Amino acid sequence: MEVDSEGHDQFENLPSPPRASQYGTGATVSSDTDASGVKLRRRLGDLVAKYEGLELKYRDLREIGIKTAEQNFDVLKEQSEERARTASELISNLKADLATQRSLAKEGEQTKKRLLDTEARVAELTKLLADAKQEAKTLCNKLAQTRSAEVAVTSRVPGSAVKGGAAAARAIATASSEAVQAAQLKEDLYGDLTGLIVRLVRRDPAAQVFDCIQTGRNGTLHFKLEVEKENTGDNYEEAHFTYKPQLDPSRDRDLMDLLPDFLTEEIEFARPHAAKFYSRVKRSLVE
């Protein structure tokens, strides 16, 4: 019984063998750690590859974006410059049109003023013509009255005393009246054919002054023609004419623009050139 107890104590002091479960756990942990490292390195490699791919795509996209932005900028710049040029040309054209409109408006106002002045001139000349015709008619009436008075006076004198004188007076009066009427008819006909109206004749010691109006398609010219009186023994051809235009710049501007320069100022010429002078006056107002 004692041997068994000692032997039992000895068996109890012996180290117990390692368990199978303890040796197996260490190997498993080491293996799992290696597998995780491999997976991490593989995943890290994948991430690095993806990062590099993304970075490459980013660079490409960035370059494409920059180029596209530059191209868009160039296009927008060109479009802006083209619009600016178009706007500048439009503004220039509008300014030119505005200047033209202002010029036309100014010319229209001037033309309107000239038209009013011309109408006033025509009215004035029409009145002068009517006055001249009335004056001629009055002179004819006065001549007729004078003739009647002479006839009446002659009728009061005894027939035996003035029979011959009365007949002569009546004949003279009749001839004078007919001469005046004939002269007036000739003057009217001449005015109708040529457009020249002689309104007034004034006799000065040195000359005769004719107040004339020449009408035509281009307007009406008012002028005075002074004819030098010939002295006794002087040659008829040596008499001088002096042309004095009666032009008003504010009223006859259009006519002055049409007339030759020599008809807008006072000129003097000899009698042989009178016909040539009148032909130029007539041509200036008709052509």
Image (cartoon, rainbow, N blue to C red):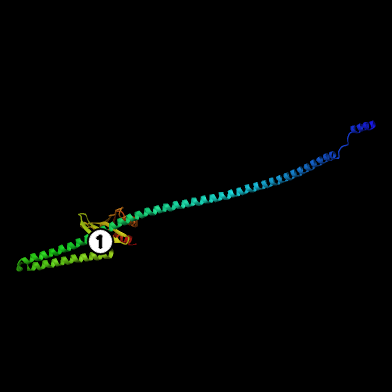
State the residue in front, 66 or 56: 56
Q: Residue at x 62, y 49 (%)?
A: 68
State the residue in front, 150 or 257: 257
Instruction: Provide the residue designation for mark 1.
Output: 197
Q: Is residue 256 visible?
A: no
Q: Say few, some or many: other residues with alpha carbon within 10 Å of mark 1 (under 14 / 14 to 19 / 20 or more).
A: many
From this view, report whether residue 234 is shown above or below residue 81: below
Q: Residue at x 23, y 61 (%)?
A: 130
User: Which quadrant holds residue 193?
Assistant: bottom left
Q: How many marks?
A: 1
From this view, report whether residue 245 is shown above or below residue 148: above
Q: Is residue 79 left or right of residue 287?
A: right
Residue 230, percent across and down?
Answer: 22, 57
Q: Is residue 159 left or right of residue 61?
A: left
Q: Is residue 197 left or right of residue 258?
A: left
User: Which quadrant holds residue 235?
Assistant: bottom left
The quarter of the picture where the C terminus appears is bottom left
Residue 93, percent across and down?
Answer: 46, 53
User: Which quadrant holds residue 283?
Assistant: bottom left
Identify the element where label 1 is drawn: strand
Q: Residue at x 23, y 65 (%)?
A: 188
State the residue in front, 193 or 107: 107
Residue 192, percent across and down?
Answer: 26, 65
The quarter of the picture where the N terminus appears is top right
Q: Is residue 144 visible?
A: yes
From this view, report whether residue 265 is shown above or below residue 27: below
From this view, report whether residue 14 is shown above or below residue 263: above
Q: Residue type at mark 1: give it.
A: Ile
Residue 199, percent across and down?
Answer: 23, 59
